[in-house]
Image (spheres, helix red, strand yellow):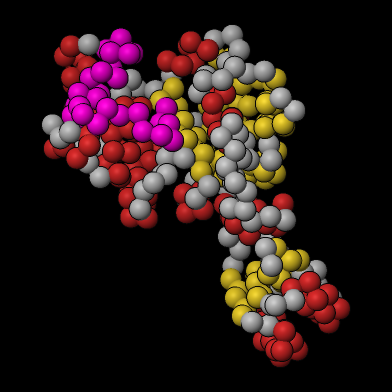
Amino acid sequence: MNRQNVALRVDEVSHAYGERQALAGISLEVQQAEMFGLLGPNGGGKTTLFKILSTLMPLTQGRVSIFDHDLADHAGAIRARLGVVFQHPSLDPKLTVFENLQHHGHLYGLWGNALRQRSLAVLQRLGLLERRRDLVETLSGGLQRRVELAKALLHEPSILLLDEPSTGLDPGARLDFTATLEELRDKQQATILLTTHILEEAERCDRVGILHEGHLVALGTPDELKRQVGGDVVVIDSLEPETLRQRIAERFGCDPVVVDGNVRVEIEQGHAFVRDVVEAFADAIQAVTFGKPTLADVFIHLTGHQLWARQEETSA
């Protein structure tokens, strides 16, 4: 990694809410013109880190620098260089698309013809120019998220921070929104950091950091992370999963685990293993699936838990 091209650097950042540790010594770097994803369950620490990076929450331990500006000493300078899209809508539904951009531009000291031209340019870039006179409340969820992104880009920020940007979108709108981010990265050299619990969104990032209970448990490209899982992933549904786990371990000399009531085995040549295990224990098996590892499998491999198993804790 070229340290001269680092846009954002996080060094040993920790944060606690009373006795609960929301972040525990997080360190990572985001390169310029990179789309970086923070993947993890609700309550894993993503929102806490997002709030710190977006200057909404004070940094209590560790160090953050954005384009060599130290967050602790230059929060105002950093804030001016950030484009932020929050998880919850920040648009005024009773105003038009264009009016929302105008009011947002005033917050950044933009006025008059310069603001108008910049608004029109960013709307054209995001395919919203023909909808500029539409009331926000008449737009689809996908288009509203694109207007949120237009607001974030209006003042030409150095880095985009997006908190769960696809929340509430249907699969088609989600893919369209992610494609928009990719185009910004590829054509505008935008630096993007987003938090997500959606696997498809994380898969399309250049690199991913996986958060679990405040710890950064993995960091790398999606393919690098998936290679941490040994071979194929076989999932077996059984009425007595623990008994079957023990029988499989003894018979095949592998190391199966029980996760959410299913027996999971990471093994090479999964299709052959499925044939053999069904032949050996047909009476104990309800159903079997196998496939190549996903980022959800990486999370299970590292933590022993499903990505979606934990309930959201709003302060994390």
Indicate whether residue 103 is drawn in magenta.
yes
State which quarter of the image contains the C terminus.
top right
Viewer-proximal residue among 93 and 229 = 93
When the figure is inspected, residue 46 is found, relative to residue 158, above or below; the finding is below
Q: In the rendered structure, which segment of residues is drawn in magenta?
A: 84-110
Indicate whether residue 278 is drawn in magenta.
no
When the figure is inspected, residue 206 is found, relative to residue 60, above or below; the finding is below
What residue lies at 48% left-to-right and 10% top-to-bottom? 76
**Residue 153 falls left or right of residue 287:** left
Residue 301, image x, y percentages = 70, 57
Viewer-proximal residue among 133 and 309 = 309
What residue lies at 62% left-to-right and 48% top-to-bottom? 310
Question: Count of labels shown?
Answer: 0
**Residue 307 falls left or right of residue 55:** right
State which quarter of the image contains the N terminus.
top right
Can residue 119 be seen? no
**Residue 252 falls left or right of residue 219:** right
What residue lies at 40% left-to-right and 31% top-to-bottom? 85
When the figure is inspected, residue 165 is found, relative to residue 225, above or below; the finding is above
What residue lies at 22% left-to-right and 11% top-to-bottom? 111
Can residue 282 be seen? yes
Residue 300, image x, y percentages = 67, 57
Residue 269, image x, y percentages = 67, 77
When the figure is inspected, residue 7 is found, relative to residue 218, above or below; the finding is above
Q: Quadrant of residue 251?
A: bottom right
Q: Quadrant of residue 96?
A: top left
Viewer-proximal residue among 109 and 121 = 109
Q: Quadrant of residue 112?
A: top left
**Residue 69 falls left or right of residue 297:** left
Viewer-proximal residue among 189 and 149 = 149
